[in-house]
Amino acid sequence: MNAVVPSRHFAHAHHWGIKAALAELPLSSNPYRTPKDRAAWVAGYHQASAPALIINR
């Protein structure tokens, strides 16, 4: 069974996107060159900057 596993560099870009959002860097500060890595960085950035969902039970 072959699972789709993100490459190490992809995970690295996602992680640094999260850190950039937490440091309040602008979205334009994305340092990655390849479209895949840039997309991972942006996904991490948006994940960290998204408002938290509050669920009432």
Image: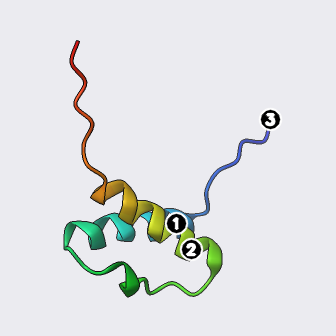
Residue at x 21%, y 18% (from the top left corner): 56
* Left or right position of 47 against 37: left
Between 30 and 26, the residue placed more toward the observer is 26
- Of label 1 and label 3, which has the lower sequence position? 3
Check the picture and name the quadrant holding the N terminus: top right
- The vertical placement of 20 against 50, above or below, is below
Is label 1 in a helix, a strand or a loop? helix
Q: Quadrant of residue 26?
A: bottom left
Q: In whole angstroms, how far apart are the C-alphas of marks 3 and 2?
A: 26 Å
Q: In whole angstroms, how far apart are the C-alphas of marks 1 and 2?
A: 5 Å
- Residue 40's label in the rendered image is 1
Image coordinates of residue 47 in percent, x first then y, are 37, 55
- Residue 37's label in the rendered image is 2
Between 6 and 56, the residue placed more toward the observer is 56
- Of label 3 and label 2, which has the lower sequence position? 3
For badge 2, the amino acid type reads Asp
- The vertical placement of 29 against 3, above or below, is below
Q: Quadrant of residue 38?
A: bottom right
Image coordinates of residue 5 in percent, x first then y, are 64, 51
Are discs 1 and 2 less than 8 Å apart at CB? yes
Residue at x 36%, y 78% (from the top left corner): 27
Judge the density around disc 1: few (<14), some (14-19), many (≥20) Cα neighbours within 10 Å: many
Residue underneath mark 3: 1
* Left or right position of 17 against 41: left
Check the picture and name the quadrant holding the C terminus: top left
For badge 3, the amino acid type reads Met
For badge 1, the amino acid type reads Ala
- Residue 31's label in the rendered image is none
Looking at the rendered image, the disc whose residue lies closer to the viewer, 3 or 2, is 2
Image coordinates of residue 17 in percent, x first then y, are 38, 69
